[in-house]
Image (spheres, helix red, strand yellow):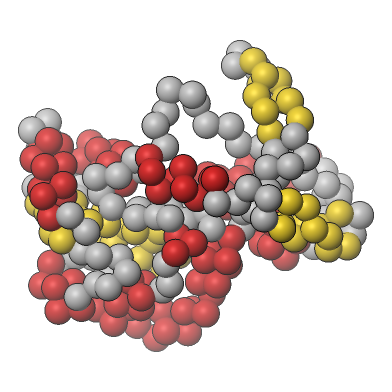
Amino acid sequence: MPRIAVVGGYGAFGARAVERLARTGAVDIVVAGRSSADAQAAAVRVQATSKVAISSAQIDATAPDIAQLRALSINVLINASGPYQRQDYTLAKSCIACGIHYIDLADARAFVVGIAELEAQARAADVLVTSGASTVPAISSAVVDQMMPRFVRLDEIRYGVSPGNSFDPGLATTASVLGGIGQPIGTVRDGAWTIVHGWQGLSRHRFPQLGQRWMGYCDIPDLTLFPMRYPTLR
């Protein structure tokens, strides 16, 4: 049976990944993170309602032990341990060295865009290395791709993401959001690159059935990737 490790598997997003994977009944799961106690507690909690094998391990995303990764005999590693603004590609490189497929939930612009530097190494090892399996850019680009056939040419994209107020994003996500306040953000306007600043440009948007939400500028991978993916954008 395939075996998947979720690093940060007891955090806000990692715990949900573990729970969803456990529902499939088709994979063995390793809950991992810097705290072996927290990882073990999360594994025990999910195991109580799961039919798949769930174990735990101590893995630090910033300093993984390659020998330990090999010993875990995993096929896929999901990195859910943000904030990614403070990480490099050490964990991804370790996965490549061990022949493990790597996926992360990053939405940090530089981190997601920069993962391309590992393409040659990943291809040589015949593994998948992918970043940005998150609301942005994965889901946002999927929405645009789905709507593309409706347009002769795509000039402008205006969209926003608003999390539910009942969702606790966790410390790492909150730190990531607050870290962008006032920071310069490069974006394309009228066919040229310009600078806006984090969480300025405030406006209110009415979502159907949800009501109004405040929206502001946020530095996300899409701002680099979309002009490359959709070259007619202005």
Q: Residue furthest front?
A: 182
Q: Is residue 164 above or below residue 62?
A: above
The one of 210 and 151 positioned closer to us in this rendering: 210
The image position of residue 80, as x and y in percent, is: 35, 53
Q: Is residue 30 visible?
A: no
Is residue 66 visible from the viewing direction of this image? yes
Q: Position of residue 110 (x, y in %)?
A: 57, 66
Left or right, 158 with respect to 67, comes to right
Mark count? 0
Query: Where is the C terminus found, in terms of image quarters?
Result: bottom right
Task: Report the residue at 20% width, 78% height from top.
Answer: 66
Q: How far across and how far down the image is residue 213, in percent?
A: 65, 24
Q: Is residue 16 left or right of residue 5?
A: right
Residue drawn 83% across the image and 63% down it: 193
**Residue depicted at x 16% and y 49%:** 39
x then y, percent, for residue 96: 33, 78
Residue 59 lies, with reference to residue 141, above or below; the image says below
Q: Nearer the viewer, residue 146 or 35?
A: 35
Specify the farthest residue to the right.
190
Q: Relative to the observer, which residue lies in front, 197 or 103?
A: 197
Q: In the image, what residue occupies the spot 60% across and 51% down?
A: 180
Please indicate whether residue 206 sits to the left or right of residue 189 in the image.
left
| Quadrant, the N terminus | bottom left
